Amino acid sequence: VQSPVLPLLLPLADMIEAAASWMQMDGVRSGELWLLAELLEMPLPPGLVWVPLGALAGSSADAHAPRFGICDESTGEVLEGHPYESFFAEKLARVRHGHVAAHMQTDAQALLDGALEWRGRTASAAA
């Protein structure tokens, strides 16, 4: 008997794998899927988009390098150090160490506000 839920999850498999790759996870445990779904649901600041890194010229061929990244839509530059990276890496570490509080809901607005502030700093530094 085939599960009725599995076909619903298959379209998300590539996105979940990409999010795990971006977070440099060596494997995804079932208890961590919620964290990846939360990451994928977080809005990016205006002008930033998720892009497959293999599609960008000169991208790394390293098998352990993330397959997706956050890109500035206007310049095509892949951005390093986005606040989501450290936030979700810390949250993953807490989850893997068994901290129940890590499962608490993320304040999406506060995280987005931090990302917008970071974006303003990186844009003015590039100018």
Image (cartoon, rainbow, N blue to C red):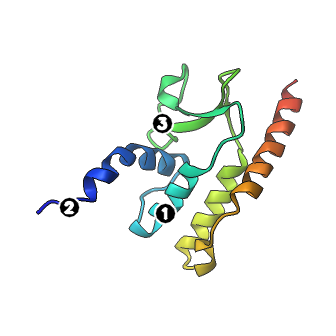
x, y percent for residue 40: 54, 49
Badge 1, how many Cα within 10 Å: few under 14, some, many 20+? few
Query: Vertically, is 94 above or below 54?
Result: below
**Residue bearing the label numbered 3:** 62
x, y percent for residue 60: 52, 30
Residue at position x 62%, y 50% from top?
42
Residue at position x 45%, y 61% from top?
33
CA distance separating discs 3 and 1: 27 Å
x, y percent for residue 25: 49, 55
**Residue bearing the label numbered 2:** 3
Badge 2, how many Cα within 10 Å: few under 14, some, many 20+? few
Q: Which of label 3 and label 2 is nearer to you?
A: 2
Name the amino acid type tagged 3: Asp
Closer to the camera in the image, 96 or 11: 11
Badge 3, how many Cα within 10 Å: few under 14, some, many 20+? few
User: Which residue sits furthest left?
Assistant: 1
Name the amino acid type tagged 2: Ser
**96 relative position to 125: left or right:** left
Which quadrant: the C terminus? top right
Q: Which of label 2 and label 1 is nearer to you?
A: 2
Residue 34's label in the rendered image is: 1
Q: Secondary structure at mark 2?
A: loop
Residue 49: quadrant of the picture: top right
Q: Which of label 3 and label 1 is nearer to you?
A: 1
Q: Secondary structure at mark 3?
A: loop
Query: Vertically, is 72 above or below 114?
Result: above
Residue at position x 70%, y 62% from top?
107
**12 relative position to 94: left or right:** left
CA distance separating discs 3 and 2: 36 Å
Mark sitting earlier along the chain (3/1): 1
Q: Secondary structure at mark 1?
A: helix
